[in-house]
Amino acid sequence: MVAKPGHEQKHDSVNLHDPKALNSPAAATAAAANTIAHAAENVTKRKDDGEKKQGENTPAENSYTHGAFHWTAERASAIALIPLISTQFVYGAHPICDGLLGVVLPYHIYLGFDSCITDYIPKRTYPRWHRAANWTLAGATGLVMWGCFEFNTNEIGLTEFIQRIWTA
């Protein structure tokens, strides 16, 4: 029988601090019951800590689906970069590939930095810094995408620029 948290069973016949008594089956049973009671108490505490307060929203980034989506998006953007970059090497500069590269590459970099922010500036520890870092990253990514668009439409394009740097 498992004891409820706060209602641990008393084991008067076994002293759990006596090394000789710990070798007996009764001591093993008492130790197991004590461990189970503490585990149940910890689970209850975690459930109480995890309950939502009125007006408090649970962030989506703490869910398993968010992590799975993030992982899939990182891999998809990495795989999408392979044909984009290889097409540029084989056929040279092309405006459609430049446009796609100007979106997929900054998005891939955004996902990588977002993982760094999630890992090294955790929301539960540094809520303000986490929010500031996410907003800064989103703003910088938007500016980079806009800059890539401007460079691709008004200048020579990303691929031609890289080719000129390598041949210079």
Image (cartoon, rainbow, N blue to C red):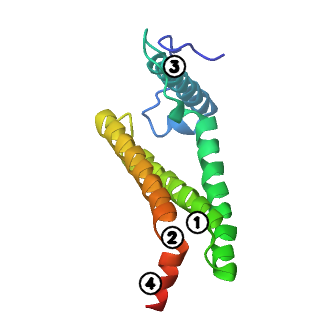
Q: Gap in Å between the C-alphas at discs 4 and 2?
A: 11 Å
Q: Residue at x 46, y 63 (%)?
A: 154
- Amino acid type of disc 2? Leu
Q: Position of residue 19 (x, y in %)?
A: 46, 40
The numbered mark, 3 or 4, whose residue comes first in the sequence reads 3
Circle 2: element type: helix
* Mark closer to the observer (1, 3): 1
Disc 4 marks which residue?
165
Q: How far apart, in angstroms, are the residues tagged by discs 2 and 1? A: 6 Å
**Discs 3, 4 touching: Cβ within 8 Å:** no
Separation of disc 3 and disc 4 at Cα?
Answer: 58 Å
Q: Are marks 2 and 1 in contact (CB under 8 Å)?
A: yes
Amino acid found under the numbered disc labelled 1 = Asp
Q: Nearer the viewer, residue 81 or 95?
A: 95
Q: Residue 47's mark? A: 3
Q: Which mark is residue 158?
A: 2
Q: Secondary structure at mark 3?
A: helix
Residue nearer the viewer, 114 or 62: 114
Question: In this rendering, is residue 114 above or below 77?
Answer: above
Residue at coordinates 31% horizontally, 37% vertically from top-left?
126
